[in-house]
Structure formats: C-alpha cells, structure tokens
C-alpha cells in the first residue's frame, strides 16, 4: 500500500466532497490535494491546488496537470429527482466514466474511490432508475486499469460541523441522527468517517470493493 497520498478530489463544492477534502487537508499521510471544480471551493491550504474546469466530459485541456496522483476521491454527483433517465445517465455514468478513464490512462497506479449510494443495483436490471445507473457506473469502473477501485455506499450521512456546504434541509432533521444510530447503527455514517475510510483505502487497502456503511466505519477506524 502507498505510504503517502497525493489525491484528486471532485465535488469539493458539495457537502460530501467538502467533507472529504476537509479530512484530506487534516491528515498527515495526505501530501497533496488537487480539486477540480466548475467554481472555486473557497478553501486555501498549503497542500491544496485547484483547477477550475467547466466540462467534465472533456479533460483534454487539463490532462498535463493530472499526473503524479495515486488516488481520486470522486464525490461529484447529482440527485435523480425530476430527471429523465437519459439526463441522469449522462451526468452520472458518462461523466464519471470519462473522468475515471482519463485518470486511469494518466495514473495507472491510482486508487479510485467512487461515492455511490445505499441501494445501488449491481445487476443493472432493477426497477429504480438511479440504482441501475449507479450500478452500471460501479461495474464499469471496476473494469478500468486502476490499482484499486472502491465503491462507497453511504446511507444517511452525518455532516461535519462548521463546513459551509451542508445541505439546507439537514438543519431540520440532524437532531434525529443520534436516535437513528441507537436503533439502526448502520443507517448513518459520519462524513468524517467517509473521508478517513477513503484515505485508508490508499494506505491500508480493504478486502471488499463495495463498501456499505459498516465497512466504511471499519475502514475509517483502521
């Protein structure tokens, strides 16, 4: 396993990506962080470099800046609510596979961590559109020539306090998390645990490619 993490983070202007970035900047084993965003994330740190790039379906203009990294924590995603399958497929499957294919070509020793979701359909044949698309994305990521690929399937995520991109509706039900964790401990994972688990995939590895909440907690604690 790698002893030092040089990581690319996507989705750093969203709640999950910002939380993962936060853990990377705090962690001693993370040496460099590159974030690729459509707009500035507003974070400054000696470890951090940022590329503003609008078209995630075409990285040709920035490929020269994407070498030398041994991890990608892919936290970019959209909700399927109100979307037709073609649009969701384009923004979820096509976009992710393009970015991943580019990075696999440039950094074949890379560990790629993809934020999927609880309930993702690995058969690609189920009733739920979003679950089928996520399932195909997971399956095709596994075919790329990375050193390792891990699919993270968090359920409810407990946000990291003090960060700015917490989803607005969290303030209305965050008080429920302690109750939910009491009766269903594997229904909730801390965002900090997601970030730590991603870092530990690079430095420690894990025996499963698909990480449910229980796996994320185990890996975060290693």
Image (cartoon, rainbow, N blue to C red):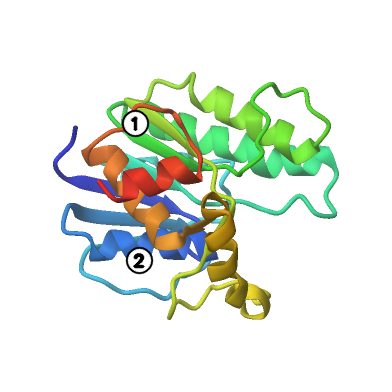
Instruction: Determine the CA span between mark 1 and mark 2.
Output: 25 Å
Residue 60 horizontal/vertical position (percent):
47, 39
Determine the residue positioned at 19% across, 32% down.
Answer: 1
Q: Nearer the viewer, residue 30 or 198?
A: 198
| Image depth: mark 1 or mark 2 in front | 2
Residue nearest the viewer, comparing 175 with 73: 175
Residue 23 at x, y = what percent?
A: 32, 62
Residue indicated by mark 2: 22
Determine whether 90 is above or below 166 in the image: above
Q: Tell me which corner region of the image, top left, top right, bottom left or bottom right, holds residue 167.
A: bottom right
Q: Is residue 70 visible?
A: no
Q: Which residue is mark 1?
A: 106
Mark 2 crowd level (few <14, some 14–19, many ≥20, 10 Å Cα) = some
Picture layout, residue 64 above or below residue 31: above
> Is residue 213 visible from the viewing direction of this image?
yes
| Position of residue 49 in the picture relative to residue 15 (left or right) | left
In the rendered image of this protein, does residue 99 appear above or below residue 11? Answer: above
């Amino acid at each position: 396993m790698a002893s030092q993490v040089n990581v690319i983070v996507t989705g750093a202007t969203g709640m999950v990506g910002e939380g993962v970035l936060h853990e990377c900047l705090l962690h001693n084993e993370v040496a460099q962080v590159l974030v690729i965003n459509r707009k500035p994330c507003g974070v400054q740190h000696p470890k951090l470099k940022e590329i503003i790039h609008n078209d995630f379906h075409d990285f040709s203009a920035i490929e020269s800046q994407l070498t030398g990294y041994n991890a990608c924590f892919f936290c970019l995603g959209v909700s399927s609510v109100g979307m037709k399958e073609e649009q969701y497929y384009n923004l979820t499957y096509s976009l992710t596979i393009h970015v991943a294919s580019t990075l696999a070509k440039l950094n074949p020793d890379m560990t790629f961590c993809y934020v999927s979701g609880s309930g993702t359909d690995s058969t690609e044949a189920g009733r739920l559109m979003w679950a089928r698309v996520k399932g195909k994305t997971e399956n095709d990521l596994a075919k790329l020539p990375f050193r390792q690929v891990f699919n993270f399937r968090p359920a409810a995520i407990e946000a990291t306090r003090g960060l700015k991109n917490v989803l607005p509706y969290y303030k209305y039900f965050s008080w429920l998390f302690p109750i939910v964790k009491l009766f269903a401990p594997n229904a909730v994972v801390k965002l900090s645990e997601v970030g730590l688990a991603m870092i530990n995939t690079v430095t420690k590895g894990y025996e499963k490619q698909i990480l449910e909440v229980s796996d994320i907690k185990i890996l975060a604690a290693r």
